[in-house]
Amino acid sequence: MSAQKKRNFKIEAFKHRVELDPNYAERTWRVLEHAIHEIYNHNASGLSFEELYRNAYNMVLHKYGEKLYSGLVNTMTGHLKEIARSIEAAQGGFFLEELNVKWGDHNKALQMIRDILMYMDRTFVPSNHKTPVHELGLNLWRDNIIHSSKIQTRLLDMLLDLIHRERTGEVINRGLMRNITKMLMDLGSSVYQEDFEKPFLGVSASFYSVESQQLIECCDCGEYLRKAERRLNEEIERVSHYLDVKSEVKITSVVEGEMIANHMQRLVHMENSGLVSMLVDDKYEDLSRMYNLFRRVPDGLSTIKDVMTSHLRETGKQLVSDPEKLKDPVDFVQHLLDEKDKYDKIISKAFNNDKTFQNALNSSFEYFINLNNRSPEFISLYVDDKLRKGLKGVSEEDVEVVLDKVMMLFRYLQEKDVFEKYYKQHLAKRLLSGKSVSDDTERSMIVKLKTECGYQFTSKLEGMFTDMKTSIDTMQGFYSSQYSEIGDGPTLAVQVLTTGSWPTQPSAPCNLPAEIVVICEKFRTYYLGTHTGRRLTWQTNMGTADIKATFGKGQKHELNVSTYQMCILMLFNSADQLTYREIEQATEIPPSDLKRCLQSLACVKGKNVLRKEPMSKDIAEDDAFYFNDKFMSKFFKVKIGTVAAQKESEPEKQETRQRVEEDRKPQIEAAIVRIMKSRRVLDHNTIVTEVTSQLQSRFLPNPVIIKKRIESLIEREFLERDKADRKLYRYLA
Amino acid sequence: MASRRGRIRFNVGGKIFETTATTLANAGRHSMLGALLDDSWNPRQPAEGEAAEAEYFIDRNPACFAVLLDLLRTGELHVPPNMPEKLLNREALFYGLLDQVRAARWGPFDGNRLQLVDSVSGRAPGDGTAIRAGPDGGCCVAHGSMVHVYDWMLEEHRPISLDYQQVNDVGYIDAESIVISARERLGKGDGGMGVFSSSTGELRHRFRVSHYDQVKSFTAGALSLGSSDYKIFASCKGRCNEYGIGVWDQITGQQVDFFYEPPGCCLGDADKLQWLDGDKCLMVATLFPRTDNCFIGLLDFRDKSVIWSWSDAGTSVSLSLDEKRVLHAIAIEDSRSICVVNQYDDLGFIDLRSNAGGVRWSSRSKLTNRKAPNEESCYPKLATHDGQLFSSMNDGISVFCGPEWVLTSTLRRSYGGSICDFSIGGDRLFALHSEENVFDVWETPPSPII
């Protein structure tokens, strides 16, 4: 206000437009330009920020923003050109050092220049669509330094050379590398990619192409994979140390492609060290490495899986068709289990429990187990062996483990009904002879079968257990009611078996000794008295007896024999010598069984309670038998076994097979009728597939047999062929 | 003496100020004060004790510096009555503290606590067409063929126009960009739609409409700037019956869609477009007096269908003057309804959930004297903000709140004539008066300290 008042008093001689000093802009710019020079020359300590800021502010305020901006561009470009010259002059290894130092200087200067020109940055730059000062500084650096012809290629060669040297084992200055790549990234992702990353990937690809070619010629598979893994980790580490994070995917894919994908087949099939020998030798570490590396490339895992599958099928096929192995069923199954364990371990240890590998393993086992049609029998025999004696003194958990493993093999079986058949036979033998180790274990196995195949599958097996239990009760009842009448006679233990639940063969009853007949009759009247409407048939071919015998020198023994053998021995109570024909006549034992019994009584050393004339291995029809009063044994109890094949003989096998086929017929028919009842009309192929899928849990029905069953059903007028289309069947309600 | 450390002494225009480094840190590194204290400009670290003696000289107005320093200390802005705003803003720009000043100037928007802070007189020759609030507190006013642009300091920038054609609607894409929709000029390809820089007023981009791969000129009407998916919707009229809603991308500026007007729906002449974020559809309202039969519809662009519509075509058989006509409409997504207003300033609601519902009028005549609409009055307008409903009525704006929309406040000024348009944005309400071409700025004062 006071200034204005004063002016009012002044008499102005001349009136001219009030104008700024024409040199004002130029002068102010000189000050700022000088400051920029000083900043680049590390001489900024003498500068006053306030003054410079005010000057820049005034230039923008007085519309000299354009002059300020273009002045900045020119001055900065000049400095950068000078810097470029000094970097170009740097010798050899100092080139990068110099570049790094200058880059640091430039950044610092840029920051200070931006501070001075902050007002221009805020007001003039956005309204005039200029590049902000910081970005401008980076762009000028890019254009004048990085893209200068003398620096660009030299920089790239230098960087690639350093990386190459590090790959060949030299130690390089990683801090410097990091600063330089950081600079490239700061200049924009396109600069980093175009000026460094692309050539870097190209050089890496050719480096690894050469190296992998050399390695594969001189290394075995395991060693090659170890080296490839190390290279991969090196590259990942390199990225983390001094490259852009986004480069990791790109460089690893280069290494994967060159070192793994390109040599995949050769590695897997490498002789003596490839996948197959790793599997054979349980090289978990190598396998795990192969898995982890191959997982990174397309088709890698499927390559491993295919080779493993074909190897498994090949070895499995040899295993199940090796006649040596077939001799011992327990050994056979044990081999299968060992093989399964081996591969389970490989998959869990080396293959990360990969589901696809587990599936491949399962399908391979399913494939070769069913190649041998005796597998169901052998598996049942294996269980039989374990349940008879194999599991003595083994803890409950271990028993479960063994049974679970068997169930796993059972799952692979296609003919589950055959297994059932054998299992029933073996179970019956175990139960009747009291050979089973533990009732709990038996039941546990039944429960497993039940959960696997359903109630229907095990109902008969469970019936057998019920029979055993009720028989004990029945016998207790019998003895408590008849106690007074029995006196000193032989003790009878009867097991009442339900027809149908047990695998009994109808056999002609033999003539029992009179003492036995008496007590048998007593039991018959007792049993039929308590249960009306039942019929009892004696299965003399399945019983056992304990008899006491006194031999020549007065030594007493207890003989454990079969019912047939008992009948024979009882005859010698009244005679010292009997011919074969006499025995046959007196006992009416079927000839084949009789021969086997006599063989075991007379021909087995140490157990020969009878003596045969003439002495020979085989029983002839005109042989004569004597009571062997010279019989000696160090045991009081003597078990006289029957000469019997544990494994089924060829004709028996045929018979079992035939029975299985017979049993399948009604099942197939039932399935056909069930399907037709719901679908009414169906063509042949659909029926076959549906029946197959319905029965799959029990067995794999043969299409020819299905066709036969359909024909039989047509004959019996359950179905008819469609009049128009002969391929169609129609359900007749 | 530990307390002396961190103290900083300024000499601003001859006056000494002392403050702490922590207070100045509120200015940020990218401000003049931040740079001044940065290590790169203070290479020698002063020894202990000597620090207090160092003093920074700044050749600026000390009174303003006091106000700004107080802002940095407390976050509040207290301008002495004798200090012009312009002066303070200029100083704030020098120090790079303009953003802090703006943030401290007014509080978050609340319709019931608004204060009139300024009235700006315009220089338009005729009636105002529209006023729009910008996201940063600025606004633009459309008069005839011109749009006047004001920043948040209410400084006027260069006015903008699209080939000097009649402006139908304007809108902000962001604080820096304004879209204008204008009438086409026959045969010249002028008019249509364009984006302008709000600070310099230059044309940045002109939107095109192509029908069957042929670029056609068009008249653009109402605008809607869908905020969530960066699209611009505009009602378009081409000369060969190419009526409908055009859709453009805000970033590329390219046409991405066109919804041709189906029979029975009025789209190309719409008065109001509103993008509904929750339902992903566009409300289109074509109303009296532009048409005799009002139409409101919701458009789904994904399958090009009208998913909801309402019209008074059937109801108004006798076209008497007293008939209640819908004059403006706004969708309120939260209450699933469309609010409308008639010539008696009654509010009405149409339920969006049923397709054949009528208008449920809630008569306001009991609250205010029903004045016969005279020649001078303007048609009422509606707006919503944060659960509050605003309705202009002659020279005042009523504020309604709550689920039943209870009248809670009235904004009125004694002069200026009736309000022809108003807009809410950037935590401000701008009301444009028809008679004296004045617009008012209403804002919520910052929250009280206690």
Image: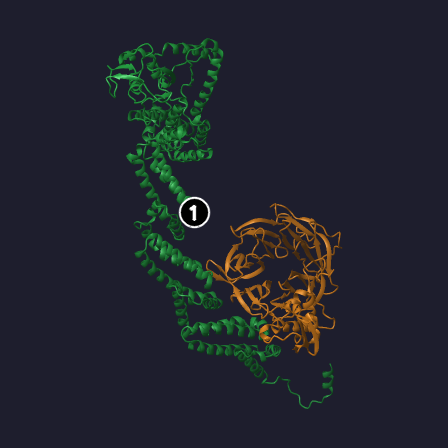
Chain colours: A green, B orange
**Residue B376 drawn at (x, y percent):** 71, 62
Quadrant, the N terminus of chain A? bottom right
Q: Which residue is mark 1?
A: A352
**Residue A27 drawn at (x, y percent):** 58, 84
Question: Residue at 49% across / 67% down in the picture?
Answer: A186
Q: Nearer the viewer, residue A517 or A463?
A: A517
Q: Amino acid at mark 1?
A: Asn
Q: Does the image show residue A199?
A: no
Judged from the image, the secondary structure of the residue bearing numbered disc 1 is loop
Question: Residue at 56% across / 74% down in the picture?
Answer: A112
Q: Nearer the viewer, residue A373 or B74?
A: A373
**Splitting the image into 4 quarters, where does residue A408 fall?**
top left
**Residue B41 drawn at (x, y percent):** 59, 75
**Splitting the image into 4 quarters, where does residue B396 fall?**
bottom right
Quadrant, the C terminus of chain A? top left
From the viewer's perspective, tell me whether residue A456 is left or right of residue A586. Answer: right
**Splitting the image into 4 quarters, where does residue A336 fall?**
top left
The mark total stands at 1
Instruction: Please identify the residue farthest to the front as the structure is shown.
Output: A553
Question: Residue at 66% across / 66% down in the picture?
Answer: B102
Relative vertical location of residue A528 with respect to residue A400 in this rendering, above or below: above
Relative vertical location of residue A445 with respect to residue A275 in this rendering, above or below: above
From the viewer's perspective, tell me whether residue B217 is left or right of residue A261. Answer: right
